[in-house]
Image (spheres, grey):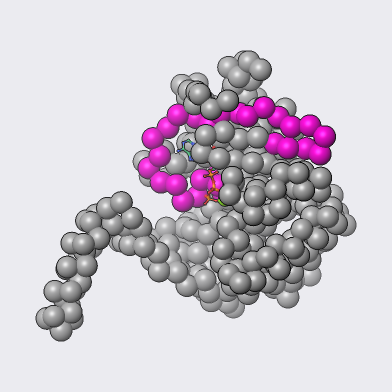
Amino acid sequence: MDLLKEKRALIKKLEENFPKGFRVVVMPHFCVDNFVHCEQPFESFIKDVKNIVLQGGGNIPLKQNLHRGGKAANCASALASLGVYTYLIAKTNSLGYKLLEHFFGGKCVDLSHVSKDGELAFTTALELKGVNIMLSYPGSLSKFGPECISEKDEELIEEADVVCISDWGMNDKGTELAKHVFSIAKEGNALTFFDPGDPSPKKEKEQVEINRVKTILEEGLVDILSVNEDEIKRYGGVDFLRSVTRIDLHTEQYVKTYYKDKETEKIPTFNVEPIRLTGAGDAWNSGDILAELLHLPDAQRLMLANAVAAYYISHPAGAHASREKLAEFLQSATLRTGIL
Ligand SMILES: Nc1ncnc2c1ncn2[C@@H]1O[C@H](COP(=O)(O)OP(=O)(O)OP(=O)(O)O)[C@@H](O)[C@H]1O
Ligand SMILES: [Mg+2]
């Protein structure tokens, strides 16, 4: 396959007028991330902490920044930047809601399906040299089940073009949520997109819960399953998964789609220097979803997803790409070589 020809065709599509009026629904994770820029090795940070303890408590002045976090909120941000009208279904508290309004100021994200009567999910990330330590409180996310979906949400899900659920692993009621929401989506015309994520947080329940997810897949409720290299094995392997859904596999080096009876070539990712990796998967999903809405051919779809992710992970301020910026990025971006 001539990948450069595909890249040129993709740039042309990005520069064309897009059809408007797509409606994408994403859920359920929104989190406030507090980045603490420690910028020192672990040992020296611990030494500072010990000295403070020895003097009976005190202050360590450190630069800190609040950011939008959570897979659904990140995906909404990336989709809206690309010009896709996105609805976020999530639960937080009134402070979280105010922050959401701030984070999404000026972007086409509808927050009217976010309820404010829950708990704020909050993560403090201690960014030390070479290692990050996350202190996470999942708030309402850990129990976001079908009872959190209102009648108004159900109507939205039924009328959407795409319904995306992420962060199943972190949500104790993730299996029930996926079954409920995807069943409603299937009553309408929505394409169902599932990024279950790392199953490790399920701990001793992991295998039982994965088996329940397999049943949901066997029922045909998931149109697209977005997984990385590790997840594709943990959720049952290529042979099983492709027999029940479409698999969109993404890795740092290459990406690939497996259909029941055919598969794409490995499409290489772009050469960039990542500044951050958190949120790469969410940006990738948004590119995949947009390309799906535009009915792009497989190679261009996968390339678009790679470009959205590469742009985000290498952007100095962590901005998501607009279509114009993405087309510019693609003009000069080079594909990774030596992976095939
Ligand atoms: N080092 C990198 N260079 C270029 N692109 C990258 C790199 N890392 C990630 N990407 C892009 O981001 C995509 C998603 O990354 P990855 O497969 O690691 O996601 P993930 O493991 O699901 O991560 P997440 O924790 O964000 O869900 C890749 O397929 C690729 O397009
Ligand atoms: Mg992921």
Report whether 188 appears left or right of 146: right
Q: Magenta stretch?
A: 257-283
User: Along the horizontal axis of the image, is 182 left or right of 174?
Assistant: right
Q: Residue at x 18, y 62 (%)?
A: 44
**Would residue 116 be seen by someone viewing this image from the given angle?**
no
Is 74 inside the magenta-drawn segment?
Answer: no
Q: Nearer the viewer, residue 203 or 49?
A: 203
**In this figure, what is the number of numbered marks?**
0
Residue 81 x %, y %: 55, 43
247 vs 149: above or below: above
Residue furthest toward the bottom? Answer: 56
Say which quadrant the C terminus sits in: top right
Main secondary structure type of the part rendered in magenta = loop
The percent position of residue 303, horizontal first and vertical second, equals 60, 30
- Direction left: furthest residue: 55
Q: Residue at left 54%, top 53%?
A: 74
Residue in front for this viewpoint, 187 or 334: 334
Q: Specify whether 306 is left or right of 160.
A: left
On screen, 168 above or below 327? Answer: below
- Is residue 295 something that shows in the picture? yes
75 horizontally vs 189: left or right? left
- Residue at the (43%, 66%) spot, across then down: 123
Does the segment drawn in magenta span residue 258?
Answer: yes
Looking at the rendered image, the quarter that the N terminus falls into is: top right
Q: Report x, y in % for residue 52.
A: 16, 76
Q: Residue at image x 56%, y 63%?
A: 200
Q: Is residue 280 above or below residue 99?
A: above
Q: Nearer the viewer, residue 13 or 214?
A: 214
Q: In x, y percent, where is residue 13?
A: 65, 25
